[in-house]
Amino acid sequence: MLNKGLAQYQQVNTGSGVEDASPHRLIQMLMEGMLQRLAEAKGAIQRNSASEKGEAIGKAVTIVAGLRNSLNKEVGGEMADNLDDLYDYMQRRLLEANIGSSEDIVDEVMALMRTIKSGWDGIAEEVA
């Protein structure tokens, strides 16, 4: 499953050293990439650049798909199911943000991702 997430990440970020990264670090990189794309989307909305906004949000949606694909529901149980639901929600909200050029929705998704990333960053690599 992590290989699917890695492939998704490599589609949006080439040459970023993912080959040498641990599984824990790969997920961190996906989350960092997501936050970067959301910042780009917000800037594009502020500049009224529909093409840049669409590209950045499209990449963010692809990264969320990678995060969803990396979930191991057999091992993660209810936590993985809850994350899957949250990632699904985030994808739907990003589509709404793209259609409505909504900075507020982008901010909402960024806040959710920061919370998830903060929890992930607190997990020791050995546990992940």
Image (spheres, rainbow, N blue to C red):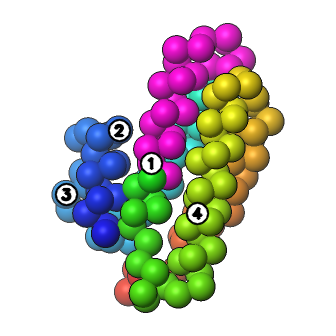
Q: In this view, does 78 lie above or below 67?
A: below
Closer mark to the observer between disc 1 and disc 3: 1
Tell me the SS state at disc 1.
Answer: helix
Q: Regarding mark 3 in the picture, which secondary structure is present there?
A: helix
Where residue 13 sits, quadrant-wise, is top left
Indicate which disc, 1 or 3, sits on the residue closer to the N terminus. 3
Counting residues from the start of the chain, the first of labels 2 and 1 encountered is 2
Q: Where is residue 71 in the image (x, y as percent from the top left)?
A: 44, 72
Residue 103 position within the rendered picture, expressed as x and y whole percent measured from the top left: 75, 30
Q: In which quarter of the image is the C terminus?
A: bottom left
Q: Distance between the residues labelled 2 and 3?
A: 15 Å
**Is 97 covered by the magenta stretch?**
no
Q: What amino acid type should be assigned to the residue bearing mark 3?
A: Glu
Which element is circle 2 on?
Answer: helix
Position above or below: 77 against 43: below
Between the residue at mark 2 and the residue at mark 4, the CA separation in whole angstroms equals 19 Å
Q: Nearer the viewer, mark 2 or mark 4?
A: 2
Residue at mark 4: 117
Query: Where residue 110 sits in the image (x, y, percent)?
Result: 67, 47
Name the disc covering residue 19, or none: 3
Q: Looking at this view, is 77 or 21 the one in front?
A: 77
Q: How far apart are marks 1 and 3 (CA)?
A: 17 Å
In the rendered structure, find residue 12 and report the number of the disc placed on it.
Answer: 2
